[in-house]
Amino acid sequence: MSQIPDNTPIIIGVGQVSERISDDNYAALSPMDLAGNALSEAIEDSGSNVATSIDTIAAIRQFEISSQVAVAPFGKSNNPPRSIARRVGANPKRAILEITGGQGPQKLVGELAQNIADGKSDMAAIVGSEAISTMLTHLKSGDKPDLQKPDWNEEVDGDLEDRGYGLEGQFDSALLKNGFTGPVTGYALFDNARRHKLGISVSDYQEQIGALFAPFTNVAASNPHSASPKSLSIDTIATMSDKNRMISHPYLRHMVSRDQVNQGAAIILSSVDKARELGIAQDKWVYIHGVTCAKEASIMERSDLSSCASAVNVVQEALNIAGQGVDDDTPLAMRDMCYLDLYSCFSFPVFTMMEAFNLSHDDKRGLTLTGGLPFFGGAGNNYSSHAIVEAVLRVRRDPKAFALVGANGGAMSKYACGIYSTRPTPWDIARYNLMPDTQGSFEVAAEYDGEAIVESFTIAPNKKGAVASIIARTTDDQRVAAMVNQDDAATMQRLSDDDAIGRNVTISHQGKGVHHFRLHRDAEINSA
């Protein structure tokens, strides 16, 4: 241990907090209060009052400040990292507001660890929170929190490194113009494409999702921070009911990320030298063996809607950096990972990793440390902070073990991976790898009239009935997005009754990038 270089970055403290509306001690905490409490827990976990030694705080964007159109109905902080800092008595030299995306916490671990290794920082914290459940409760009741208190709406002096939203190229405008409403419909496209590739029915695929997520619910049921701490059976997850309605074909309610949460989490990193100076016990030290991240092409430009090679490459590279990769032609395997948390906003990201790394839904290690986003909760961008907290706690209790955390942003748009252990490892190689962005494989047809072949589809119920949308391949091998004309009941019925993927459709441009498609009764099945 004494041979570990002074500039080696380590995690010395972690913390997480939560509250549910039904809790006896429910306090309706604001996002900044939840985040401050989480950082306070992380400081306490370190075993030393390290608040005044934190020179960098990076805040994860809460849901209400994650896009240009997002609204914070009860106000917001003008400087989240400094709002959080003042709650614990910290005054960092550097305050960062990270871009939007669930990859953020995991990516920041690598970035801030590299800063420590380079001598640019001695101690840094990553903090995030969501109070969506409380916010929605206030909105529904008509009550408002006391806006005179510096809880929801506050201004704090000090510099801020605001990195912007970072949403460029994440979601194609062609999709938004043709009925796609965001990540849930994007992931539905991916899972439908994967289902078709496997050649199985919708009900059988939903059964597979149920088998995947039922063990997650058991983990959530035992996690005191879970938004939904109860076990669910495969049938309950996979069967439509009043409490498990269709969200976006093929997803039912229990299959999608839970947005109504009140949760916060924090991670404190330090150099070995600073940890020794402050007397941080070595049984608190967790080493970062590898962090990788990359950005995928937009949905419409991707080479394959049924898989995501860039995310797999990110995980494989993290394993390689940590010395856990496979060096020959044998199937990829997370062979020495004792603890896994695979990002689970929907089933597709988990299935992607399962296929690539030869994992099964009943892997004895489990595929989640928290209970997963649909059950533990995973609104906004901060879920993987909780996963990292759990990973740190696991490896502390199990010395020499390895934990792997996968973190995902957008619609499989940005992926990050981190590997943790109490096994000492110096930062003697590039353990943080910001990998090249994946380039697109297809051009997008902004205006198209003619025949095309459906690559994937989804149907999303709404107050007016439903919106059915497709991605299709044109005769000149471009991609086009289209939706059903609301008056075309025949196409909507055929789409609902049958698997449209691989079938011919007629597409007509309606102006301004909006396309309608018509699925014929005798539509020929082709190879997309």
Image: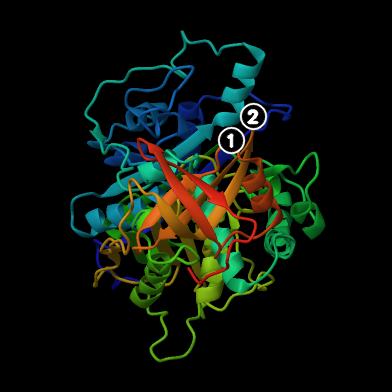
> Residue at image x 24%, y 61%?
7
Q: Nearer the viewer, residue 337 or 445?
A: 445
242 vs 319, left or right, is: right
For marks 2 and 1, the one nearer the N-term is 2
x%, y% of residue 369? Answer: 60, 58
Q: Amino acid at mark 1?
A: Gln
* Foreground tag (2 vs 1): 1
Residue 3: percent from the left, percent from the top? 28, 73
Residue at the (60%, 55%) spot, across then down? 520
Count of all numbered marks drawn on residues in the image: 2
- The amino acid pointed to by label 2 is Lys
Query: As rendered, which of 388 and 461 lies closer to the eye?
Result: 461
Q: Secondary structure at mark 2?
A: loop
Q: Residue at x 46, y 41 (%)?
A: 178
Residue at the image point whose x is 56% and y is 79% from the top: 358
- Disc 1 crowd rating (10 Å Cα; few below 14, some 14-19, many 20+) is some
What element does badge 1 sit on?
loop
Residue most extreme to the left: 119
Q: Is residue 228 above or below residue 366?
A: above
Q: Are marks 2 and 1 in contact (CB under 8 Å)?
A: yes
Which residue has dot 2 on it? 464
Image colouring: rainbow
Q: What's the mark number on residue 486?
A: 1
Examine the rendering and report whether any part of residue 195 can be seen: yes
Left or right: residue 389 versus residue 12 is right
